[in-house]
Image: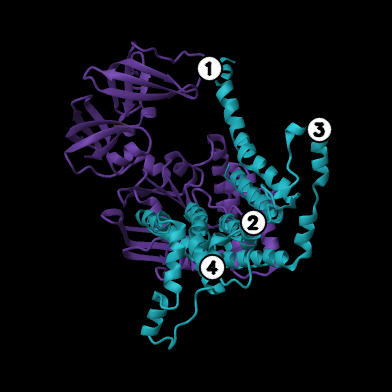
Amino acid sequence: MSARRIFARPARFAAIAPYLWMVLFFLVPFGFVLKISLSQTAIAQPPYTPVFDFAEGRAALAAAFAQLSFDDFRLLISDDLYILSYVRSLVVAVTSTLILLLIGYPIAYGMARLPQRWQGVAMMLVIVPFWTSFLIRIYAWINILQHDGLLNKILLALHIVSTPVVWLSTDSAMYLGIVYSYLPFMILPLYATLSRMDASLLEAASDLGASPRQAFWLVTFPLSLPGVAAGALLCFIPIVGEFVIPDLLAGSNSLMIGQTLWLEFFTNRDWPVASATAVALLLLLVPPLVLYDRLQRRQLEGNG
Amino acid sequence: MRDVTLGEASAETVRPLSEAAALDMPLLRIEGVAKSFGNFRAVDRLSLDIRAGEFFALLGPSGCGKTTLLRMLAGFETPDEGRILLGGKDIAPVLPHERPVNMMFQNYALFPHLSVRDNIAFGLKRAGMARAEIATRVAELVALVKLEGMEKRKPDQLSGGQRQRVALARSLARRPQVLLLDEPLAALDKKLRESTQAELMELQRRLGMTFIIVTHDQEEAMTMADRIGVMDAGRLVQVAAPRNLYEAPASRWIAGFVGDINLFDGQVVSREHGRLTVSTSEAGPLAVSELWSPVTKEIVSVAIRPEKVKLSRRGPASDEGGSQAINRLDGVVIDVNYLGGVTTYKVKLESGAVVRSSMANTARLNVDAYLAGQRVVAWFTADDCLVLEQ
């Protein structure tokens, strides 16, 4: 009982702290965005109406509330521009995630099979690029991919092509940039799952007549699925909202939702539509987030 | 009482082995096998024959190489030297997944993502068996290890004892010529271990299969095995039936490893009619029968198991042991340990040496009990003594 009294206050704070954080840095800002998304654009400061003024009394607030509308959300569904951006974001995210899986799985598998002392080195090699700013690395890719960049010089020197190839402002460049940037997020969860796997399970499979290939597909791969799911969602979710990489490396003829949002906000100064876009994007990402959370929990229960 | 179809069916798989037996060829022959890891010699030029239908135990302290030897039989390690012949054929080039040998792993190595049924069926599916046949075989095995009703459970929904049974059923499913068991009972509690020992023995007898078990528990090896191979530092130091191993250990190390023993170092001073007199500094002259093999060396150790040392207040009348010579040692009880079925005593002799005695508590009232500080005579016959060369 005395122990309870001693720990009651800090323990209660520790229990509340994450919720406090969520309320302050997620729910409150989200409330602002949601409110703006229901407002109308205006040439004013701030550039939307109505503005809630709590000093003017209840009647004025009620009038302001009455002005809120779902018009901007209706616009999102009716205008091709937004639907196409959402679709493109999903296509890019799915394609990138599949490429990341195809590249990341063999790397993670190879890392997990290395002798113990080399695993740390391999891990460093995966993480070291993070020490350079993300933006600088993307600019470096622009340098490599541009008309007289390193890649074209090498291809010309090796006589693989006769004229410089256009790399920059293509989808290939964008996928290259995305895969390059997100690869560690795919490798690390996969590596964590694969390196924890009990080696005696593979011996048991082999003992029971499974060839190495069968043992991989019947034991290793199914048991690594939690890692596959974690890696895939860890990449998929931020790629959907990716803005910098498509903006710098892809062409401008089709936009991802992050770019559309940026355009509405900064070029058109239409805060309500930009906010509605953001809210819709968030709703789009709720199902994969819930899925991720459920998988994580199931794995925790499985280990416990 | 239990389904015996598996036992009958397995007779067909055992037949080729009995042919090998008819040719007077052991089922498994290990010839000068050696294996090193870096500078560590895990198995050191070891040779061993194992007969078909035998329950053989590899016994030794941890690090003695017994598990490495087992893993070489399964194919998970390749011998650096020597040959392993199964039914007369060298199995060195045979990959683990193609060997007619199965292993039950110490941690069971059950596939966590598969149900009990799928774990047991895993090896049968790899063998390309027809689906209906797999279903029948799995049902037989489930009945054999008494896991009816658990077929759909995953390993993490089973108790330790149930997992052990799944592992056993899975390793028996392919009806291997030899079943390797790596410390199969180590994870079970004492009561469960004892009942499982009995079940394993019954199963082995019924299936007529050859079992090779690795264990560090000498009681487990003695209970279950037909023969025991004691390993130390990568070598087999003795291969014998449990009784011979206990009553006639080949060396001081084995005598101490298998059970408890009192040792007195001394020198042979006389020998007549198969009876030696050994002069020891700690216990004076001791009469010893030369029963097992002739003693060739002069400097020897006299060994006596604690349960063969009796205590009495005055010592037995000289004719109590019949014609046997009796060794009597005077001393003081310094320690008494009551263990229920037996009581162990430590008796300090005048030389300062301590003799351990263990006596069965055959009566409920403590008429035979001795107290610490009491003067007693510890006595034993010449036939109960062993002579070990140093």
- For this rendering, which residue is in front, B62 or A220? A220
Q: Nearer the viewer, residue A241 or A229?
A: A241
The secondary element bearing badge 3 is classed as helix
Between circles 3 and 1, the one closer to the viewer is 3
Q: Quadrant of residue B122?
A: bottom right
Q: Nearer the viewer, residue A43 or B88?
A: A43
Residue under label 2, please give it. Answer: A265
The dot on residue A102 is 4
- Pick whichever, B147 or B156, lies toward us: B156
Q: Position of residue A225 (x, y in %)?
A: 59, 58
Residue type for callout 4: Leu
Badge count: 4
Q: Which mark is residue B364?
A: 1
Instruction: Tell me whether marks 4 and 2 sit on the same chain.
Output: yes
Kindly check if marks 2 and 1 are in contact, taking CB atoms under 8 A apart as contact.
no
Q: CA distance from mark 4 to mark 1?
A: 74 Å
Task: Give the number of the disc on residue A58.
Answer: 3
| Helix, strand or loop at mark 4 | helix
Q: Quick check: B267 above or below A3? A: below
Labels 3 and 1 touching (C-beta < 8 A): no
Q: What subunit carries mark 4?
A: A
Tell me, by letter, which chain the rendering colours purple: B
The quarter of the picture where residue A76 lies is: bottom right
The chain identifier of the residue carrying mark 2 reads A
Which amino acid, mark 1?
Arg
Closer to the observer: label 2 or label 1?
A: 2
B188 left or right of B314? Answer: right
